[in-house]
Image: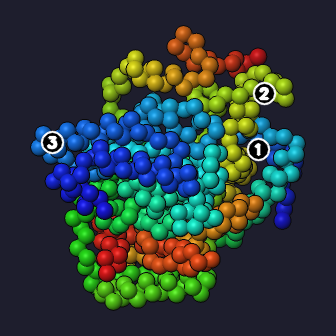
Amino acid sequence: MSVLKKEEVKHIAELARIGIKEKEIARYQKDLSSILDYFKKLKALNTQNVKPAEHITGKKNVYRQEDTVKETKEKEKEGILKNVPHKKDGKIKVKSVLN
Amino acid sequence: MINEIHQKILNQEIKAVELVEKYFKKIEKEDKNIQAYLTLTQDLALEQAQAIDNKVKRGEAIGKLAGIPLAIKDNILIQGIRATSASKILDNYIAPYDATVIRKLKKEGAVFLGKTNMDEFAMGASTETSAYQKTKNPRDLSRVPGGSSGGSAAVVASDQAVWALGSDTGGSIRQPASFCGVVGLKPTYGRVSRYGLMAMASSFDQIGPLTHSVEDAAITLSVLAGEDKKDATSAKSSDKLYENYLTGDIQGKKIGIVQEHYEGLDKEMKDIFFQAIDKFKKLGAIIEEIEMPHNQYALATYYILITSEVSSNMARYDGIKYGLSIDDEENSGAGLLETYLDTRQYGLGAEVKRRIMLGTYALSAGYYDAYYKKAQKVRNLIKQDYKKAFQKVDFIFSPVAPEVAFKFGEKMNDPLKMYLSDIYTITANLAGVPAISFPIGNLTIDEKKLPVGGQLSAQWFDEEGLLNTAYTWEEN
């Protein structure tokens, strides 16, 4: 079984924006490696002339009609803002992206 | 069951309000043992029931589902009602809008009893990963109800609702239906709108009913199905009333069986499977051996694709727009990145995190071609297997699960073992075909009768053929 390196696990966690503790890394190495090994089964299959699966129902490019977007009603805004953890003046508060 | 209740409401033998009160009494008595409900919606239910009673009194027409109480899986949104997807990260989330299926059911006058327990974010096959509680299998309280729609299956099996809504990404309606001894239908992908269903794997998810009978599954599907502008992946409406296609005649219909499916089954499961096939033969169906050569690659294909889609869909749970927002300033910093890291570290459960990590890996630079792109090609091969099969047969009959309901904790430590529970159900989601699980027998273990389901699948959008075939078996 090829085991993922610690650095790889840390890198994946960073990409996934999930904080992990040192003691969790070993568990992830084991779990991810064993599942990834299982995925290697697919390598043996010849898919040279196979196209990737498209949308199941064959639908393509469903667009919204022009001018169908209306302004959000007050009541709808309330329902949305009710769930916002940090808000100010009816807007969602976000910490600065650039420091 | 639904039709009988509907008639009683129509000729005023029973009032919708009485029915609702009867069910809440049952819930009060049963659910402390079963633990299927996360949230009860008594006020809403009584309001809905009263509205139907008023209509009946005024002599107004009512729909087939009017006044009939159902339960809803907690990843489907009802406006103003808590929706958690069995995760701590949404512990305090109140849905700001109705899912399309909910809007349709409200229009029909259905009555909502409450939200049911599930595996967290629908990831699991036992309902054990719920961050809140463990739902017990009503047939044996030491065993799981299956998952991820375990709560929904359990409420129907224990008469705590007439029927329930579930969702199915890799078997999450069918497998718990099999474990609990009820009917579970996964429609063709696109048949039922996904608007208002918290997305797990967007090219796999479908909402479907769990019911007491195949006829009930047909009646409910008629209301749930239909094209929806708000779901760009929904298919053109068929405008069919599926219950009108239940003829009870399957003479000459060809049903395919796959050797790889049944040869691995334990003897007792195999016996039940073949008894079911004999019954199909007696009803005039023709059984044919067919091949699905890419079956062996299904599990790997499924898990690469769904974890990839999961890693994308779960990105929205970041502590900014809704749900839990954590800043563990002691262990990490106090910036935006730390909000993401901490919220997701503490708010999401182990299985959810594991799948996000897998999907992130599969989609990351250097691995995309080897995993995701490859899996998408194999998905196409699996779809072709079904196309070729349906040139020879009308339906495919297979097991639902390799086993009956297992005991709590039996599979929790080995994710791969848990994933193998899905082996018979995932291909229908990979190909998008409709599939139904219905009870075909029982296995007696520890003096408890544990249900076994059989699975029928049909061609894309042939829900009427699918339902009629299952119905015919069930009625004889």
Classify residue B182 as left or right of residue B86: left
The answer for which chain carries disc 2 is B
- Name the amino acid, label 1: Ile
Residue name at image x 21 percent, y 64 percent: B244
Callout 1 and callout 2 share a chain? no
Describe residue B404's horizontal placement relative to residue B472 as left or right: right
Q: Nearer the viewer, mark 2 or mark 3?
A: 3
Which residue occupies the extreme top position in the image?
A: A89
Residue positioned 74% across, 32% down in the render? B342
Task: Determine if residue B107 is in view.
Answer: no
Name the spot of residue B134 as percent of width and height, x first.
62, 53
The residue identified by callout 1 is A12
Provide the secondary structure element on which disc 1 rests: helix
Please give the chain letter of the residue carrying mark 3: B
**The quadrant where residue A35 appears:** bottom right
- Amino acid, disc 2: Asp
Whether residue B4 appears in this view of the structure is yes
Q: Name the outermost residue toward the left.
A: B59
Closer-to-camera residue (B35/B297): B35
Q: Which residue is mark 3?
A: B57
Marks 1/3: CA distance? 62 Å
Instruction: Give the amino acid type for the residue marked by disc 3 in the picture.
Output: Lys
Decide which of tag 2 and tag 3 comes sooner along the chain: 3
Estimate the spatial distance between the alpha carbons at disc 2 and disc 3, rounded to whole Å: 58 Å
